[in-house]
């Protein structure tokens, strides 16, 4: 299997037209057709069924598509990394991260990026989900890491990375800390801390309202660091993502009845050229396993 065959197939899977795919790949249609036929022979079946304007991928083609996408992306990343290492290129990368996302869970891909791009220059900024999205739109960041954001902008690309639930956090000496699971009605009368920029804040607030839970006071913070510091110094509680950083003096518990989950995703602007370092980092994120990632 040759890389140009994979490139031809990926183009064909998008256009579903041999003529347009050949134009995109800058080859003749007969050459592209021969390459696809050779690939089909190697894989043992048809990848695309030609039916005039109704051409479509076969079941084999649909199964091969994500595998070949990853294969091609990995090959492109390898070339970019090799060029950066041999030429010691400066590789800028601007990354916007939501306050609700614990960037420590992304350290393995970041460490690989530092190893592959010795000349990398990272710029990491933080903000609410909305602020992160605006930085992408305005060109202030190439990539973003955030929870669920408004997907109404048609140029926004999304790659889900990790899905997780929420936990109740409090000081280890808090009256509720003796329980591993807490009923909602036991939260009445306690102070609560909430992250201002959390993408799921409205959903959480609506859930508390539906449960008729009344807090004695509500505090607002921006970062996980501030949240942990204030919980350590107070009798308050907070609902935090499972991947939020832990603190030694705090306890986590399940909040019974709350079935909310959120998905952390990588975001980028569709059709906008990305730097080699941004493309490499995106591929590292997409190939990483975050199922057990937590601080």
Image (spheres, grey):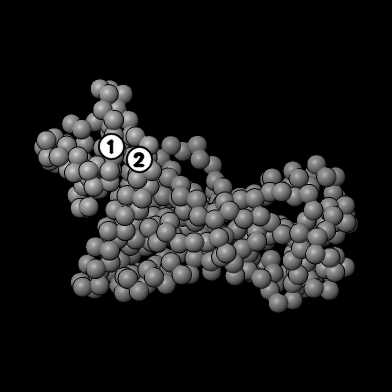
At a point 83% along the width and 74% down the height, the residue shown is 173
Disc number for residue 95: none
Above/below status of 39 relative to 98: above
The quarter of the displayed image where residue 168 is located? bottom right
Above/below status of 78 relative to 198: below
Q: Position of residue 91 (x, y in %)?
A: 30, 66
Of callouts 1 and 2, which one flags the residue occurring earlier in the amino acid sequence? 1
Q: Position of residue 53 (x, y in %)?
A: 28, 22
Q: Is residue 32 visible?
A: no
Number of labels in the image equals 2
Lateral position of residue 5 relative to residue 63, left or right: left
Seen as rendered, the residue at the extreme front is: 44
Above/below status of 190 relative to 263: below
Q: Nearer the viewer, residue 149 or 223?
A: 149
Q: Position of residue 277 (x, y in %)?
A: 33, 62
Q: Are marks 1 and 2 in contact (CB under 8 Å)?
A: yes
Disc number for residue 46: 1
Element type at mark 2 = helix
Lateral position of residue 115 relative to residue 211, left or right: left
At a point 29% along the width and 39% down the height, the residue shown is 45
Element type at mark 1 = loop
Q: Position of residue 292 (x, y in %)?
A: 57, 64
At a point 43% along the width and 56% down the height, the residue shown is 286
Q: What residue would you read off at disc 2?
A: 60
Q: Is residue 52 visible?
A: yes
Q: Residues within 10 Å of mark 1 (few under 14, many from 20)?
A: some
């Amino acid at each position: 299997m040759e890389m140009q065959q994979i490139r031809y197939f990926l183009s064909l899977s998008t256009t579903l037209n041999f003529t347009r795919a050949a134009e995109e790949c800058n080859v003749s249609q007969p050459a592209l057709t021969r390459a696809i036929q050779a690939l089909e022979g190697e894989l043992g079946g048809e990848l695309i069924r030609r039916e005039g304007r109704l051409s479509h991928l076969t079941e084999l083609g649909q199964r091969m598509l994500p595998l070949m996408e990853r294969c091609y992306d990995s090959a492109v990343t390898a070339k970019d990394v090799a060029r950066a290492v041999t030429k010691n290129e400066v590789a800028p990368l601007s990354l916007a991260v939501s306050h609700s996302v614990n960037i420590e869970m992304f350290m393995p891909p970041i460490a690989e990026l530092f190893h592959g791009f010795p000349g990398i220059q990272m710029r990491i900024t933080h903000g609410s989900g909305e602020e992160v999205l605006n930085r992408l739109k305005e060109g202030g960041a190439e990539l973003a890491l955030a929870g669920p954001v408004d997907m109404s902008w048609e140029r926004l690309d999304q790659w889900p990375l990790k899905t997780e639930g929420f936990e109740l956090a409090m000081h280890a000496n808090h009256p509720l800390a003796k329980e591993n699971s807490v009923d909602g009605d036991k939260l009445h009368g306690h102070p609560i801390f909430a992250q201002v920029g959390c993408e799921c804040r409205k959903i959480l607030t609506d859930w508390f309202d539906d449960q008729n839970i009344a807090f004695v006071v509500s505090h607002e913070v921006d970062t996980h660091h501030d949240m942990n510091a204030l919980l350590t110094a107070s009798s308050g509680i907070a609902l935090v993502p499972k991947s939020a950083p832990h603190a030694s003096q705090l306890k986590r518990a399940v909040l019974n009845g709350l079935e909310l989950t959120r998905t952390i995703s990588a975001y980028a602007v569709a059709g906008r050229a990305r730097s080699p370092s941004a493309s490499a980092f995106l591929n590292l994120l997409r190939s990483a396993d975050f199922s057990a990632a937590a601080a």
